[in-house]
Amino acid sequence: MGKIKIDKKTLENLKNWFSNYVQSFTHEDKYFQENIALKEKHTLQVCKEILNLGEQLGLNENERRLSEVIALFHDIGRFEQYAKYKTYVDGKSENHAELGVKILKENQVLNMFNKSIQTLILRTILYHNRLSIPEGETNTCLFFSKLLRDADKLDIWRVVTDYYNQNNGERNGILELGLPDTAGFSDKVYQDMLNKRIVDVKYLKNLNDFKLLQVGWIFDINFVPTFHCIKTRHYIKKIRQVLPESEKIETIFGVIQVYLDEKTSTREEIR
Ligand SMILES: [Fe+2]
């Protein structure tokens, strides 16, 4: 990863571009504005998460700046997606990662970088919302894709656990994918979780399925420091609290607990 060079000024300029871009979506409708603000805050938090992970993983200054650029732009497609379709569900609109890449290219946002850095940034963005990272990528691309996916999940856990555990009882369809809050959960989701497989959004039938899917993201986490964050912030416990009592749910959380304990007791190299 030796040839990555990103200076402070460049990073600052990109942050300014981001903030101006988001401001262009200012809207008088309160609900609209809240949903835009949700993604802006998420983006800035993912920047913090990625820097924190990067530091623990021993990245140098240039690598840390690159990781921040990637985090800053990973959801840039969200704003146009919401403005155009009023939803964050890719299946009901378009793929927000592809949309983001298109926006970055059209606005020539990354033009100060050489081609290989541009490709690296665009690919990590393109891969951040895929079920898995495609094979055959360079080690550098693989590393930053994994880092972004970990940082992104850490902050989505913050968003959803805050939401589930808020006490005003207000619901936000945007955060629930429009799924009904009915009893029980799907057997397909249960089976995937038991086999430590990432659940595909297309199998979700109700909100409990979605909560289980979010717990199952743990099977897609890549780095030891991320597992430590999950543990100290009690994300898993907080989601469990808002799921029904059931033997199957208990079984799932037993599997998750063993997995998390294993990952946080490892003596292997942290990276
Ligand atoms: Fe994100």
Image: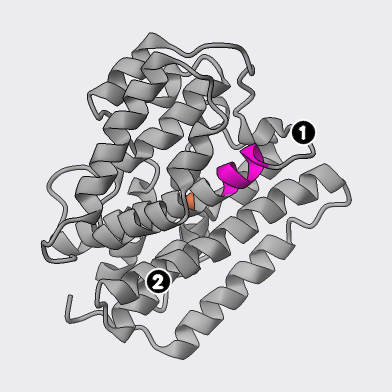
Q: Is residue 101 visible?
A: no
The residue segment tinted magenta is 159-165
Residue at the disc numbered 2: 52
Res 216 quadrant in image: top left
Residue at the disc numbered 1: 169
Amino acid beneath label 1: Gly
Q: Is mark 1 within 8 Å of ligand 1?
A: no
User: On the rendered image, what quadrant is the N terminus found in?
Assistant: bottom left
Taking the spot 47% from the left edge, 37% from the top edge, the residue there is 95
Badge 2: few (under 14), some or many (20 or more) residues near its Cα, within 10 Å? some
Q: Marks 1 and 2: in contact by CB < 8 Å?
A: no
Is label 1 in a helix, a strand or a loop? loop
Taking the spot 33% from the left edge, 47% from the top edge, the residue there is 127
Asked if residue 131 lies left or right of residue 84, the reply is left
Between residues 67 and 207, which one lies in front from this camera angle? 207
Disc 2 versus disc 1: nearer the observer: 1
Say the numbered circle drawn on residue 159.
Answer: none
Taking the spot 37% from the left edge, 16% from the top edge, the residue there is 248
Residue 234: within the magenta? no
Between residues 49 and 121, which one lies in front from this camera angle? 49
User: On the rendered image, what quadrant is the C terminus found in?
Assistant: bottom left
From the viewer's perspective, is residue 94 above or below residue 147? above
Residue most extreme to the right: 28
From the viewer's perspective, is residue 160 above or below residue 140? above
From the viewer's perspective, is residue 97 above or below residue 73? above
Res 81 quadrant in image: top right
Res 61 quadrant in image: bottom left
Alpha-carbon span between mark 2 and mark 1: 32 Å
Is label 2 in a helix, a strand or a loop? helix
Q: Main secondary structure of the magenta part?
A: helix
Q: Is residue 67 visible?
A: yes
